[in-house]
Image (cartoon, helix red, strand yellow):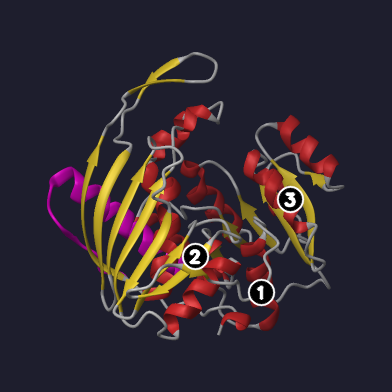
Amino acid sequence: MAPPHPMTRVALIGCGTIAVQYARSFRDYSEIELVGVTDLNAGAAAHLASEHDARHYGDLDELLADDSVDIAVNLTPNDAHEPITRAALQAGKHVYSEKPLALSVAGAESLLELARARGCRLACSPFTYLGEAQQTAWRAIAQGELGRVRLVFADVNHGRIESWHPAPLPFYEVGVLFDVGIYPLTLLTAIFGPICRVSAQSHTLLAERRTAAGETFTLTKPEALFALLEHEDGPLVRLTANYYAHRSRQTGVEFHGDAGRLHLGDWQMPDCELAQASYDEAYRPLPLLCPSAGMRWGRGVRELAQAIREDRPHRASAEQAIHLIEVLAALESSAENSHPVAVHSSFPPPERLPWAR
């Protein structure tokens, strides 16, 4: 179902901190028009709307009733993703959701079934593997420059949320895996395909925390995880993810193959440091295949809009998002019960961007 207008018109559901970044990034894309926003916090929505000359919808129903909206962008809190996306699909909107698509595999699968029944597209973050550094690394691996990649180290040392965010509790409640561990796993499954088995341990390192305002709180969920993940036809991955270590020298993703190795300095930033080496040589900088304009949070929405216009499968697919939810749930189960957990879902692999083929 192609957009009916010369431009793809998008509306934001949720006007928190990340919505500001999405809205700003749309200014860089001439084919994207931000037509409106809505939020339970009417003041935040009104402010964002005025900054971008967009409409302030009084509520979700008003936004979904607007026939000019082609793509609804779901930027609500994690536990609201599934019901908000469901409402948007039922209204006949294409949907791009922030991660996770839902908090359970069953919930995410039901959203995909609804999207197919309604003839709508359903896409989900993370989109960050579309970045220039990530695509450059992927191309080097795909062309065999490292030989067969057999081992990967992925490090998500994300620090203590309360050190920079005034309301850290939602991050700790959803957990480090669903919040940030998902980023390198999205990249790795895009490159190497589905994960088939995981083993994990989780720990609470610092239970008692204090917000910037001086309020104390106690963690109810482990904030550090150490895991091994096996791909069906790919490398063994060692993942560390925590809300404790800050400014660690163990960063990004390092790929080790029979013929060489490659270090991606950051699993999120598209202009991060990239280095490559043969098996017994020192790392040397690996130039990006094309210049990076830095982080643009609307990149995934734009890719979805382009796919609709070109009548091709979109990247950042719901199928991959569902697989990742199963992987994350399997990791949590393995950590809780101290045994390996099999992962059964799969997904159609995304293609590299044309300039990275």
Q: Which mark is residue 185?
A: none
The magenta stretch spans which residues? 316-345
Quadrant for residue 218, please give it: top left
* Quadrant where the image shows the N terminus: bottom right
| Residue occupying image coordinates x 26% and y 75% | 232
Direction from residue 180 to residue 76 in the image, left or right: right
- Under tag 3, what secondary structure? helix
Quadrant for residue 348, please give it: bottom left
Q: Is residue 236 above or below residue 50?
A: below
Name the front one of labels 1 and 2. 1
* Quadrant where the image shows the C terminus: bottom right
| Residue occupying image coordinates x 63% and y 81% | 355
| Residue occupying image coordinates x 19% and y 51% | 334
Q: Which mark is residue 114?
A: 2
Name the front one of labels 2 and 3. 3
Instruction: Answer whether labels 2 and 3 touch (C-beta < 8 Å).
Output: no
Kindly identify which residue carries mark 3. Answer: 23
Pointer 2 or 3: first along the chain: 3
Direction from residue 355 to residue 110 in the image, left or right: left
